[in-house]
Image: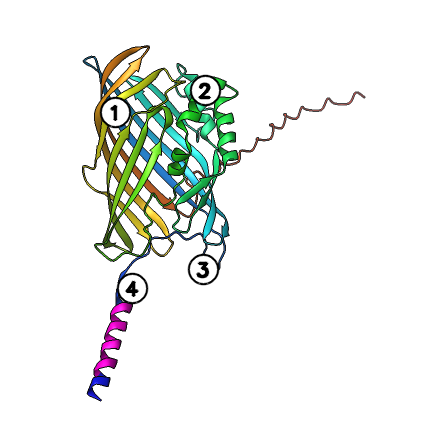
Amino acid sequence: MSRLRFGVAAALTITLATVISAQDKQAFGLKFKDDKGALTPYYQKSETDVLQVIKVQGQDLIQKQKSTFFYKWEPLAQEGEKWKVKQTVEGLVIAIDISGNGVTYDSRVEDSTGAAANPGLVNFFKGLKGASFTATLDKNFRVESVDPNDKKAFLAKLTNNNAQMEALLNKILTDDALKQMLDPALGLTPDQPQAIGGTWPRKTMLNLGAIGSYEVTYNFKYVGKEADLEKVEVTTTLAFTPPKDAEGIVFKIKSGSLTATNAVPGVILYNAKTGRIQSAKITLKVGGDLVVNIGGTDTNVRLDQEQTTIIETKDTTYVPAPMATTTPAPPTPPTLPMEPKKP
C-alpha cells in the first residue's frame, strides 16, 4: 500500500513539474487574427541610422544616412500551418550625406524634390512608395518564399524600362535579400517555447550577388519580462564571402574580410498578448579590409560602419491620409445700385 501511495505521489509530482515547466516557457509566434478570428493588419515604423567611413588611399569618404520606412503588414490567408502576408511601403523619409553632399526625400510631403542635383536618386526613392510584396511564412513564421510577380513589378517601377539599371538591381535584390526584408519576426521565432534564460540561434545566408554573400548568425536570449512585455536580447556575428560574379557594376570586391560586433546586445520587446514585436533596437558595428577592383586597378579599402535600427509596431498607420482640402467659393460680387427709372 505504501508503494502504491509513493507511486501515485511520484506521478503527481512529475505531472505538476511538467505543467509548471510548460507555464514558465514562452512561445514567440505571430498572431494574425483577433479574439474573434478576424484577420487583423498592423503597422510598423523602421528607422535606421548609418555612419559609414571608407578609407581609400589615405582619404576618408564619410557617408551618413538616416532612413525611415512606414510599413503595413496585412495577413491574407492561412493555408494549413502556413500564412500568406502582404507588406506595403506606405511611406518613407530618406536623408543622405556623402562627404557634405546631401540628398533628402519625404514621401509625406507633396512634390518632395530633395536635392535638385540628384533627381535620379530622388525618383528612385519615389518609386519605393506603394511597393508591395506577398510572402509565404512557414509554420515557424519564417519567410519561405516571395511572390516573383511582386519582385518583377517592383523592378519595373524602379527602373522605368532602364535595362542597365534593371540588370544591376536584379543582381543585388536577390531572393535572400527579399526574404530578409520581408521577415515580420526579425528572425526571432524559435522552434519551441523558451524558458527564462533560454537561448537559441538563427543562421541566415544573405546573398547580395555582385556585392558578396553574408552568413549572419543571430543569438537570441530570453531574459524575462519588462513591464508587460517579454524581453529578448540578441547578438550578431557575420562572415563575408566576396562575390564570384560582379558583372554589371563599376567595381568588383576581389577579396577581404568583414566582422560584425554588437557594442551592447540588441533588445527585442515581444507582446505575447498581440503576438507581435512591440519594439526593437539593434546596434551593429561592421568593419574590415577589402581589395576592390575599379577600372582594372586593385585598391585597398578599409570599411567601418555603425548601424542602429529602431522598430516600433502599432495597430494604426503611421502615415495618416492627408486632410481633404476644399476650394472656397468665389466671393459674391458687390451689388451695384440700381439706376433710377426715368420719368
Where residue 185 sits in the image (x, y, percent)?
Answer: 36, 45
The residue type indicated by label 4 comes to Ala
Q: Is residue 268 above or below residue 239?
A: below
Numbered range of the magenta stretch: 6-19
Q: Is residue 123 left or right of residue 313?
A: right
Q: Secondary structure at mark 1?
A: strand
| Labelled disc at residue 191 | none
How far separated are the C-alphas under marks 2 and 3?
A: 46 Å
Q: Earlier in the sequence, mark 2 or mark 3?
A: 3
Which is in the foreground here, disc 2 or disc 3? 2
Would you name the residue on which mark 4 appears?
22
Give the SS element for disc 2: helix
**Residue for badge 1:** 52
Residue named by callout 3: 35
Residue visible at 23% across and 18% down?
301
Inspect the image, locate mark 3, and give the three-letter code of the amino acid beneath it. Asp
The Cα atoms of the two marked residues, 4 and 3, are separated by 23 Å
Helix, strand or loop status at disc 4: helix
Front-lying residue, 335 or 302: 302
Q: How is the image coloured?
A: rainbow
Q: Residue at x 26, y 22 (%)?
A: 255
* Label located before the other in sequence (4 or 1): 4
Q: Is residue 210 visible?
A: yes
Q: Find disc 2 in the rendering and name its residue.
A: 165
